[in-house]
Amino acid sequence: MDGTYHECGHATGAKHRLDRNFAERFKRDSLAIEEICAELTASFVLADLGIAHHPRPDHAAYVASWLRVFKDDPRAIFTAASKAQAAADWMHAQQPQAEEMAA
């Protein structure tokens, strides 16, 4: 995934943005679920914008590290995807509207 969009995905979780916190539910896996959320956010935004992305060879190992999270909590992917969609929606909402750009 594009690193810039991935990092923007992380930024949406800040308290003054979407106030995303996985620590209570996922405890030791909260960082991994945040990484999954950021990757999904980047994927959703890139797809919405019609921007092709070309995964790097090390992405398979990166994704493989998440398997423990999914094994421990099979519904974790739904939580991550839901939060990622909220993040992508938030990012889109921050863009100027056509009438604002025309002014």
Image: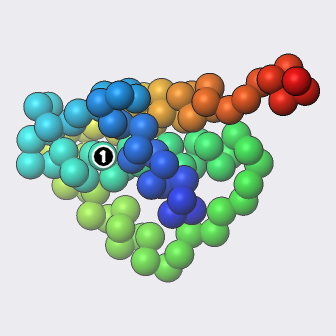
Secondary structure at badge 1 equals: helix
Say if 69 sits above or below 97 in the image. Answer: below
Residue that lies at the very extreme toward the bottom in this rendered image? 57
Residue that lies at the very extreme toward the front in this rendered image? 103
Say if 34 sits above or below 99 in the image. Answer: below
**Which color scheme is applied?**
rainbow
The residue positioned 48% from the left and 27% from the top of the image is 86
Q: Residues within 10 Å of mark 1 (few under 14, many from 20)?
A: many
The residue positioned 80% from the left and 23% from the top of the image is 100
Q: Position of residue 72 (x, y in %)?
A: 15, 44
Say if 66 sits above or below 87 in the image. Answer: below
Q: Is residue 97 left or right of residue 20?
A: right
Residue that lies at the very extreme toward the right in this rendered image? 102
Q: Quadrant of the N terminus?
A: bottom right
Q: Is residue 18 left or right of residue 97?
A: left
Q: Which residue is mark 1?
A: 34
Q: Position of residue 35 (x, y in %)?
A: 33, 52
Residue 36 seen in the figure: yes
Residue 40 seen in the figure: no
Q: Quadrant of residue 103?
A: top right
Q: Quadrant of residue 93?
A: top right
Q: Which of 30/99 is in front?
A: 99
Residue type at mark 1: give it: Glu
The residue positioned 9% from the left and 48% from the top of the image is 28
Q: Quadrant of residue 91?
A: top right
Q: Position of residue 10 (x, y in %)?
A: 39, 47
Q: Is residue 90 left or right of residue 34?
A: right
The residue positioned 32% from the left and 65% from the top of the image is 64
Q: Position of residue 32 (x, y in %)?
A: 25, 52
* Count of picture labels: 1
